[in-house]
Amino acid sequence: MGEVIARLAMSLDGYVAGPDSGREHPLGIGGERLHAWVYGLRTFRRMQGLEGGATGPDDELIAAWAERPGAVVMGHGMYITGEIPWGDDPHFHTPVYVVTHHPREPLVKEGGTTFHFVTEGPGRALELAREAAGDKDVSLAGGADLVQQFIRAGWLDELLLHVVPVLACGGRRLFEHLGDEQLEWRKTQVLDSPGVTHIRLRAPHTASRE
């Protein structure tokens, strides 16, 4: 069985989306700035069906990470904001389990992506995603509230943060509502680039498996 992993871009003050995120502003107002570093990379462009793009350490990191998931879990809010921008051929190319209160039939897209809408809670979504992923990892796509739930439950094994040198000063924070217990994650990789610093972290509970 694989692990549960998450990859998020974050501002210096801890925001993973700008203010007023929704259908009109999928990343929140100004949130595109958190992802500007990835748009020109070869791996990202390939995932969008485009050719060309920059290579190097940033691209190698993203390429290796993109090979890991066999299934994806995301929150209803992320699905709603991403549904239109992702189009008919979303970049996931795996089963995606959407945690929601709104039941509906699975939505089959091009390229191997099928959205399954799970109304029994995040734990059930994770169970289904693990079954679908097999020996591969489950990617926790977000948003922030769902990531927080996974951290509180001890379900998230590895977190890759792309820290961008900007102060968002508003929006959706990642590290909130995690309780009063101190959690010490283990740093396993730091890759510093001009526009972003990548920090790879292992959750406390994974130490017993290593």
Image: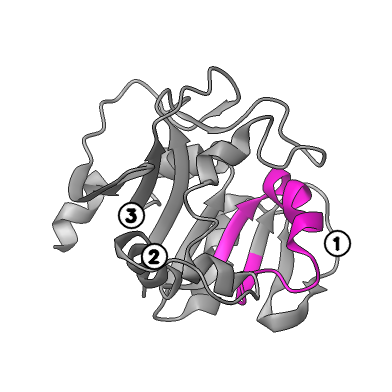
Q: Quadrant of residue 113?
A: bottom right
Q: Which residue is outermost to the top?
A: 169
| Residue placed most toward the observer, 28 or 6 | 28
Pointer 1 with pointer 3, Cβ within 8 A: no
Residue at horizontal 45 percent and vertical 36 percent from the top = 10
Label at residue 104: 1
Asked which secondary structure carries label 1, the reply is loop
C-alpha separation, residue under disc 1 versus residue under disc 3:
30 Å
* Image location (x, y in percent) of residue 176: 46, 25
- Of callouts 3 and 2, the N-terminal one: 2
- Of callouts 1 and 3, the N-terminal one: 1
Q: Amino acid at mark 3?
A: Asp
Q: Determine if residue 129 is in view.
A: no
* Residue bearing the label numbered 3: 157
| Residue placed most toward the observer, 134 or 24 | 24
Looking at the rendered image, the disc whose residue lies closer to the viewer, 1 or 2, is 2
Residue at horizontal 64 percent and vertical 67 percent from the top = 96
Asked which secondary structure carries label 2, the reply is helix
Pointer 3 with pointer 2, Cβ within 8 A: no
Asked which secondary structure carries label 3, the reply is loop
Is 187 magenta? The answer is no
Q: Amino acid at mark 2?
A: Asp
Looking at the rendered image, the disc whose residue lies closer to the viewer, 3 or 2, is 2
- Looking at the image, is 201 positioned above or below residue 145? below
Q: Which residues are magenta?
A: 72-96
